[in-house]
Amino acid sequence: MAEIKLKLKEQPRFPLEAEVITPDNFAAKTAAQIKKLELYHGNEIVKLGDFFEVSGKSNDVKDTKIVIEGDLSNVKRIGEKMTGGEIIIDGDIGMHVGNQMKGGKITVNGNAGDWAGAMLKGGELEINGDAGNYIGAAYRGFWIGMENGIIKVKGKVGRESMLWARSSKGANKFPVLKCGGAESFLGMHNHGGTIIVEGDVNLYTGADQAWGQIIIKGKAPRLLPSYKKMGEISEIELANGEKITGKFIEYSGDHSVKKETNGRIYIAN
């Protein structure tokens, strides 16, 4: 796989809008051409080479890997709408990483800001630290959030993660979020997403869930009163056909949305 290396030269004074950093935009370009790609720094148009050292070579989209070094916590939108290839970020990353991506893989070897993987349509986003609020969520004013692909967060995700997720069995689309822990309103308005939490969650998990699955292997402080206990189970079949074994208590809901709902929360017993 052809590899392009970017190294941040200096911290941007204002958030740097870097949606051009994708294998799609780098494909078949030389390092000199990549340096000339335009970004927004505040209200100014700048060149990618003004902020990054660039080396290596690219190939077609699927055969291009981008490796980025530095503290990118003030850099936004890397990997936006990418369709293939790979991005590796060795450091923290700012808001909107991988938002609306359709394919390929992004790995963040650090923490990520808000809206990581927002409205993800495919591919894989892996964050090896913590992530901010609204992970895999729908942007304000939209009714459909994450539709396909997988987000893995080793640490904790923030509030309102996986908001308005929607699956499609007929189209073989099963959005999945795996995380170490979660803040309040996880899986709110869920319409088919699968969420697996290795640790604890906070309040209001699964609020307004119509269908979908939330599996909690740690503790949940209190479920909404609109959830009903169904009993103990030892195996959970996920929407994509995979299975999780263990001792869980199954709850149906959110019954404030529908009297008969296919929404489920499973809590380790």
Image: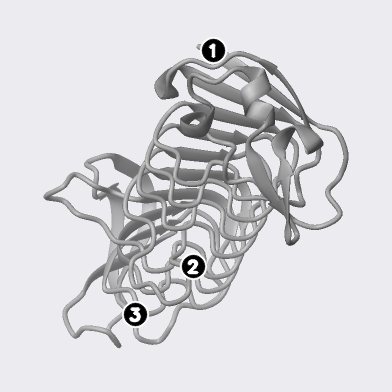
Neighbourhood count class around disc 1 (C-alpha, 10 Å): few under 14, some 14–19, many 20 upward: some
Q: Secondary structure at mark 3?
A: loop
Question: What whole-number distance in Å separates the C-alpha atoms at marks 2 and 1?
Answer: 38 Å
Q: Is residue 236 visible?
A: yes
The residue type indicated by label 2 comes to Leu
Which quadrant would the C terminus be assigned to in this image?
Answer: bottom left
Q: How many marks?
A: 3
Q: Residue at x 41, y 78 (%)?
A: 207
Q: Nearer the viewer, residue 36 or 214?
A: 36
Q: Is 120 on the left or on the right of 250, as rendered?
A: right
- In front: mark 3 or mark 1? 1
Question: What whole-number distance in Å separates the C-alpha atoms at marks 3 and 2?
Answer: 15 Å
| Residue denoted by label 1 | 2
- In front: mark 3 or mark 2? 2
- For marks 3 and 2 on the same chain, the one whose residue lies earlier in the sequence: 2
Q: Quadrant of residue 253?
A: bottom left
Q: Nearer the viewer, residue 7 or 125?
A: 7
- For marks 3 and 1 on the same chain, the one whose residue lies earlier in the sequence: 1
Q: Residue at x 51, y 63 (%)?
A: 161
Q: Position of residue 204 (x, y in %)?
A: 49, 78
Q: Residue at x 67, y 55 (%)?
A: 113
Q: Nearer the viewer, residue 102 or 174?
A: 102
Q: Secondary structure at mark 2?
A: loop
Q: Position of residue 46 (x, y in %)?
A: 74, 45
Neighbourhood count class around disc 2 (C-alpha, 10 Å): few under 14, some 14–19, many 20 upward: many
Q: Position of residue 18 (x, y in %)?
A: 64, 45
The residue type indicated by label 3 comes to Tyr
Q: Position of residue 62 (x, y in %)?
A: 41, 22
| Residue denoted by label 3 | 227
